[in-house]
């Protein structure tokens, strides 16, 4: 799944990125960085965020 697809999926579900982050106990800024491609999600919390978002 691509970041754009994840964004559309969350929008369809009516969830904000902040809600998603809170539900998965992730830092909001980490979720944003992974979705925007700033962080590739290779290690640590960024990796957990990428997995939760369905990018990995």
Image (cartoon, rainbow, N blue to C red):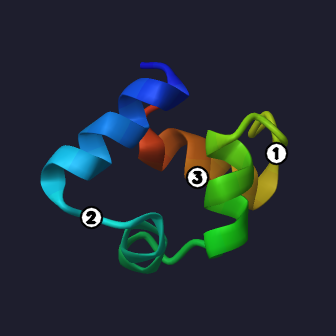
Q: Relative to the observer, which residue lies in front, 45 or 6?
A: 6
Q: Residue 15 got which mark? A: 2
Dot placed on the residue nearer the N-terminal end, 1 or 3: 1
Residue 48 vs 22, above or below: the answer is above
How would you rate the neighbour count of disc 3 (Cα within 10 Å): few for under 14, some for 14-19, many for 20 or more?
many
Q: Are marks 2 and 3 in contact (CB under 8 Å)?
A: no
Residue 35 point in image, percent of width and height: 61, 42
Dividing the image into 4 quarters, which one contains the C terminus? top right
Which label lies toward us, 2 or 3? 2
Dividing the image into 4 quarters, which one contains the N terminus? top left
Q: Residue 49 got which mark? A: 3
Q: Relative to the observer, which residue lies in front, 8 or 49?
A: 8
Q: Are marks 1 and 2 in contact (CB under 8 Å)?
A: no
Q: Residue 43 got which mark? A: 1
For mark 3, give the secondary structure: helix
Whether residue 47 is visible, yes or no, is yes
Residue located at (45% from left, 43% from top): 53
Residue most extreme to the top: 1
Which label lies toward us, 1 or 3? 3
Position of 32 with respect to 56 (left or right) is right
Q: Quadrant of residue 27?
A: bottom right
């Amino acid at each position: 799944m691509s970041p754009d697809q994840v964004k559309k999926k969350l929008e369809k579900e009516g969830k904000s990125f902040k809600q998603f982050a809170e539900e998965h106990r992730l830092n909001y800024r980490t979720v944003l960085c992974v979705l925007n491609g700033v962080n590739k999600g290779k290690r640590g919390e960024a990796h957990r965020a990428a997995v939760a978002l369905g990018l990995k």
